[in-house]
Image (cartoon, grey):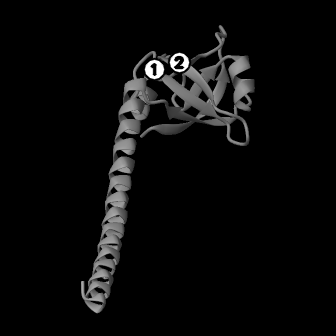
Amino acid sequence: MESIKLKVQERAFPSRGRARVHEGHMNALGIKEGDSVEVSAGGDRKPVVVTVFADTLVETGCIRLSPEDIAAAGAIPGGEVTVTRVPPVAERIRKSAEETKESVKEDVKKAKETISKKASSTKESVGKGVESVKKNLKERDL
């Protein structure tokens, strides 16, 4: 699972850009300590990206954030937010390269089909032109 819903709590010792969750949520999100997650309360606000740290003192089902991060996410203490794993840079690059590869493959396939059609059409036009020239030469007795 790459995202979960958690209840917001204010951190006792606020530190902007850092979140604390119960260690059980680390496995659920597929992350390890020090990884980044996006925290979103929904709506039109952009998600807030924070670094996550495991804390056995945080209740299961909760995330502790600084008041600034809570406000930036458009959340309220006691409210629910969606916490989503942010893939590491290497993983994002690999995924992007894979998507680009597939796109290029598709474009090459389309180009091949277009070239094939144009070549066939050109061959047909040249053939007609040759026949016309032969006919004209024959009529002129050359």
For numbered disc 2, what is the local secondary structure? strand
Q: Check disc 2 and give the amino acid type.
A: Thr
The answer to whether 126 appears left or right of 18 in the picture is left
Q: Residue at left 43%, top 22%?
A: 23
For label 1, the SS is loop
Q: Residue furthest front?
A: 141
Horizontal relation, residue 86 to residue 71: left or right: left
Q: Quadrant of the C terminus?
A: bottom left
In front of the other: 131 or 22: 131
Q: Which residue is tagged 1?
A: 35
Residue 113 appears at what percent x and percent y?
33, 65
Q: Is residue 103 above or below residue 63?
A: below
Q: Is residue 76 left or right of residue 89?
A: right
| Label 2 neighbour load within 10 Å: few <14, some 14-19, many 20+ | some
Dot 1 alpha-carbon crowd within 10 angstroms: few under 14, some 14 to 19, many 20 or more: some
Residue 69, image x, y percentages: 68, 21
- Which of 126/70 is in front? 126
Is the residue 133 above or below the residue 96 in the image? Answer: below
Could you tell me residue 31's position as x and y percent?
41, 26
69 above or below 47? above
Residue occupied by mark 2: 51
Where is residue 35 shown, x and y percent of the image?
Answer: 45, 20
